[in-house]
Amino acid sequence: MRSDVRYVRPSSLGEAVGFLSDHGPETKPLAGGTDLLISIRSGELKARYVMDVNRIPELKGIAMTGEGLSIGAGTTIAEIASSETVKRLAPVLRKSCLSFGSPQVRNAATIGGNIANASPSADTFPPLIVHETIAVLSGPDGERRIPVEEAAAGPYKSNVGSRELIVRFILKPSEGRFFEFLKIGRRKTLAIARVSMAVLAEKDMRGAVGFIRFCLGSSTPVPCRIVEVEDFLTGKILNEAVVAEGGRLAAEKMIEISGRRSTTVYKEPAVKGLFNRLLYPMVKND
């Protein structure tokens, strides 16, 4: 760390927000540090202050509340992966956490840091989006809420203000529905996702898709729900042809959002193939 960077460690949310109110644009919050430490070591850190938020109790915990499934922003990826509550009410998020980096990274990284960093390949983004998650932010003007889908303004550009902290996430619980999270990278383990996707789905009495939420990650500037795919599949009984057309629509939308690039020759068939894998169990069970 540069010698002119100062380390501060607030003990409460109020103390942290008060500090950000005065020094927010000059401050970089430190949660798990798995991304920030890379910036520090590379000399890219521009902040005057590093604010350690690990000791703030208001950022911790997993609980079912009247609003939904609440997960504190300071909760580690490992804590989410081992939570029985998450396993029951948000298993797609748990699956993404189980494949998140190495055990050492999972023990340090926090879900709030993963979202605030706004990486297109952040593993927790697609599951949170299919759960229609709300991020609760705290700042000098009080509490603000935004959909997680709107948390990233672009690659590594967050819509969380410089004087705000993510306090918690509120997920719509989804017990008993079909779920899946898949990603592919340059190698099988410990790889940054080049394509990722998450789905929540449920069949109606006829065996057709009655509910579906689908999110594409890593292959677009920000992870996003693909409503065109959801609308196409809703009301249909899944078979190989229907799923293949859904994959084609997902790839088409990916290209529409990102434009044709040198990586498109790889990512277009990758999105189609991964989508087929994503929904294959629902076809197989018909």
Image: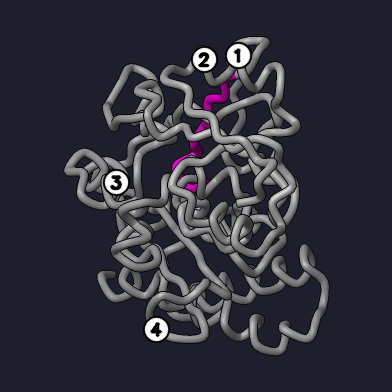
- Give 158 or 94, whichever is nearer the viewer: 158
Q: Name which quarter of the figure residue 251 lies in.
A: bottom right
Number of numbered tags placed on the structure image: 4
Disc 4 is placed on an element classified as loop
C-alpha distance separating marks 1 and 4: 44 Å
According to the picture, the residue beneath numbered tag 1 turns out to be: 18
* Residue 170, image x, y percentages: 43, 30
Tags 3 and 4 touching, CB below 8 Å: no
User: In the drawing, what numbered circle is on residue 188?
Assistant: 4
Q: Secondary structure at mark 2?
A: helix
Residue at 54%, 21% in the rendered image: 16
Q: Is residue 55 magenta?
A: no
Label 3 and label 4: CA atoms lie apart by 22 Å
The secondary structure type at the circle numbered 1 is helix
List the residue tagged with mark 3. Answer: 80
Sequence order check: which comes first, mark 1 or mark 3?
1
Residue 43 lies, in percent from the top left, at 69, 60
Q: Image height check: is 1 above or below 173?
A: below
Magenta range: 129-138
